[in-house]
Amino acid sequence: MRKLLTLAAVCATALVVAVSPASTAKIDDIHGGPVCADINSGGINDYTTGTVTFAIGTVAPSCKGITYTVYVYDNTNQNVLLGTGSAPGNKLVAPGVTDGSGYVIVSVPIDESKVTGTSRDAFCIIATSSDDRVFDTANDSGCTSFPTPGSSGGQGGFN
């Protein structure tokens, strides 16, 4: 009976490790984490008063066990956080690509009272992927300016 319980425990542990997102290919040796958590692109899809809709691009289709979060900062005063939003991974492949990359759409409610001047033409964005810890942060060196649709401000991508 003891051997049977031990075997059941070993099998259960192996099953948990085999299906865990963290057991898949890793982003890199420094950050670890699954490749589906590796953020490599993004952009503002829509901006209407009070909401920024941001697409996070991932190296592989996003993992269902990973949370993708977007932090939106004022583009003029990048110390002012305007809002945050999160979405779970969805395993969607980015449309029109053949490299197997994925994406997640995140809606972020914005505190319009904190927006300064004409900074509605672009917002400064930081995106993260996390589970029990943060796997990736884009941009690695701080926020990146993204133009809102129909404007010319901002950089337009993570480096």
Image: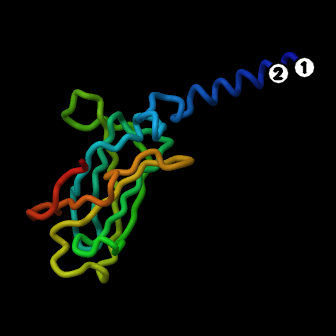
Q: How is the image coloured?
A: rainbow
Q: Quadrant of residue 94?
A: top left
Q: Residue furthest right?
A: 1
Name the residue that disc number 1 marks: 2
Give the crowd class for mark 2: few <14, some 14-19, many >=20 residues within 10 Å.
Answer: few
- Disc 2 on helix, strand or loop? helix
Question: What residue lies at 41% left-to-right and 46% top-to-bottom?
Answer: 136
Q: Residue at x 29, y 29 (%)?
A: 100
Residue at 8 percent across and 63 percent down: it is 152
Q: Which residue is mark 2?
A: 6
Q: Amino acid at mark 2?
A: Thr
Q: Counting other residues with Cα less than 10 Å from the Cα at mark 1, is it few (<14), some (14-19), or many (20 or more)? A: few
Alpha-carbon span between mark 1 and mark 2: 6 Å
**Quadrant for the N terminus in the image:** top right
Q: How many marks?
A: 2
Q: State the SS at label 1.
A: helix
Is 122 on the left or on the right of 143, as rendered? left
Could you tell me if the residues under marks 1 and 2 are in contact, i.e. CB atoms within 8 Å?
Answer: yes
Q: Which mark is residue 134?
A: none
Compare residues 159 and 150 and report the one nearer the observer: 159
- Residue 20 position, x and y percent, is 56, 33
83 w.r.t. 156: above or below:
below
